[in-house]
Image (cartoon, grey):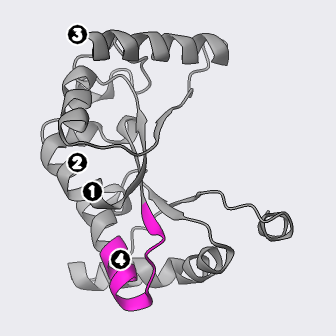
Amino acid sequence: AFALFEKYKLHPQIWRTLPSPKADTQQARVSAAAKAILPLVDRTKKLGCKLDLYNHGGWGGEPANLVAVCQYLREHHGAKHVGIIYNLHHGHGHISDFEKSFKLMQPYLHCLNLNGMNEAAQPKILSLGKGQYEATMISTIRKAGYAGPIGILDHRNDTDTEIALRENLEGLQKIINK
């Protein structure tokens, strides 16, 4: 893919889950995670692509750790193109502290993927407007002035993608119009 990006002068966002390294201290984990993705950091920088750390569970999916690795890469490797893709459907553990987590991540966010949100991820993938918490979370996002890209993903297997995306758009519209 990178050869095609270079050949056709394409500059997509590259999404990468952050590893969860084993180390004795937080500083050592941050450094190890950054070093593990450094070849990709350098390659995306040369191609003019954004590299986005994707929250997908474990240490590497925690907002504070995503931010710490972004800061480390920016400070030690001039990697201003590195940011965060945050997926609500991988952030159920941060429903209660979403405002704090969002504020921490906001300067680094390159995209925010929305999802319906219920306690304990039941179910994990839920259309917007059908959960208990996403309206409050979206209100937090709006109040914070986030103006970056927003995504709506379809991870459901029970319906056609077009129907699922339409349900999400309709749910989002209801939330926004409240």
Q: Secondary structure at mark 1?
A: helix
Measuring from the top left, give residue 14's x and y in whole percent.
60, 60
Q: Are marks 2 and 4 in contact (CB under 8 Å)?
A: no
Q: Secondary structure at mark 2?
A: helix
Q: Earlier in the sequence, mark 1 or mark 4?
A: 4
In front: label 3 or label 4:
3
* Left or right, 144 with reference to 92: left
* Left or right, 100 with reference to 25: left
Circle on res. 102:
2
Q: Earlier in the sequence, mark 1 or mark 3?
A: 1
Q: Earlier in the sequence, mark 3 or mark 4?
A: 4
Residue stretch rendered in magenta on the structure: 70-83
Mark 1, other Cα within 10 Å: few <14 / some 14–19 / many ≥20: many
Which residue type carries mark 3? Lys
Return the residue nearer the eye: 82 or 55.
Answer: 82
Q: Are marks 2 and 1 in contact (CB under 8 Å)?
A: yes
Measuring from the top left, give residue 43's x and y in whole percent.
65, 79
Q: Are marks 1 and 4 in contact (CB under 8 Å)?
A: no
- Cα–Cα gap, marks 2 and 1: 5 Å
Measuring from the top left, give residue 52's x and y in whole percent.
49, 61
Circle on res. 85:
none
Q: Secondary structure at mark 3?
A: loop
Q: Which residue was labeled with disc 3?
A: 178
Which residue type carries mark 2? Phe
Vertical side of 10 occupied by 135: above or below: above
- Cα–Cα gap, marks 3 and 4: 45 Å
